[in-house]
Image (cartoon, grey):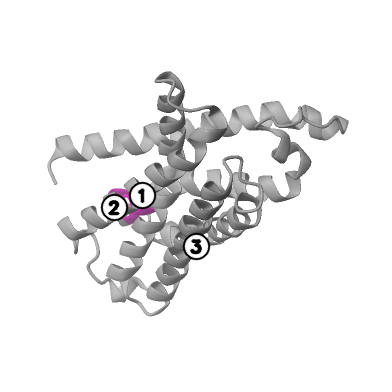
Amino acid sequence: MTRGLATAMWTAILLLIAIVLVFAGMRVADDLPLVVSGVPAELGSFGERYVANPWLAYPHIVPGVLYLVGAPLQLSRRFRTRHFAFHRRFGRVLIVLGITSGVFALVFGVPFAFGGAWQSLAAAVFGSWFLVALLLAFRAIRRRDVRMHRRWMIRAFAVGLGVGTIRIWVGLFALLDLASLRDSFAPAFWLGLSMHVLAAEAWLWWRPNANGRPRRSVLP
């Protein structure tokens, strides 16, 4: 991969993570005073379900944000090569964070979807794919199959990163006045997450063995 392409890819990844961080921060800033004071959010507002169900919403949001922030370190060949012992330990933490976030994405995102049934279906489909990818990544590394472990981790990270792209699509729908906020979420979910699944598969097809050579001498 050329230096320019690598720079563009990592720039896009960091931008999407920044978008997720900004919206997560806004969510906490809006919800926390209401949750602490016991005051319900405005009926029908976007934040109503978060304030009403914080013990379902935030076990999805907080571990999910930590997973997205930490995953690029795990996928960086330079960092992994220089700090392999940390890579192994931190990988276990990220798997737990990702699975926790994915489970609560289903528990919260499916029944409380702001955009209705089609968003619920998207949350179920892509949330399940995220969990499957993480579990297969864990199984692969337990079998010392580094190549397949990395491939499944890339798939999981791509889906998680799609949260940032969903926000971009919602913004585009609003900017172009194509749909209301509520009506924009279902198509934004399907478009954003489908793009990331396809992008991950295209990347893995283009570079099937990148950074995935077995290193049995350092595996547990």
Q: Residue furthest left?
A: 2
In 3D space, how far apart are the residues under numbered discs 1 and 3 (Cα atoms)?
Answer: 13 Å
Amino acid, disc 3: Ser
Point out the tag, 1 or 3, that comes first from the N-terminus. Answer: 3
Point out the tag, 3 or 2, that comes first from the N-terminus. Answer: 3
Residue 156 relative to residue 213: left or right? right
Residue at screen point 34% across, 56% down: 154
Q: In the rendered image of this protein, does residue 209 appear above or below residue 189?
A: below
Residue at screen point 38% across, 43% down: 191
The image position of residue 81, as x and y in percent, is 30, 56
Identify the disc placed on residue 194.
1
The image position of residue 90, as x and y in percent, is 49, 57
Q: Are marks 1 and 2 in contact (CB under 8 Å)?
A: yes
Is 166 covered by the magenta stretch? no
Amino acid, disc 2: Leu
Q: In the rendered image of this protein, does residue 62 appear above or below residue 133?
A: above
The C terminus - image quarter: bottom left
Highlighted range, magenta: 74-80
Q: Secondary structure at mark 3?
A: helix
The residue indicated by pointer 2 is 198
Amino acid, disc 1: Ser
Identify the disc placed on residue 128.
3
Q: Secondary structure at mark 2?
A: helix
The image position of residue 190, as x and y in percent, is 42, 46
In 3D space, how far apart are the residues under numbered discs 1 and 2 (Cα atoms)?
Answer: 6 Å
Residue at screen point 39% across, 72% down: 141
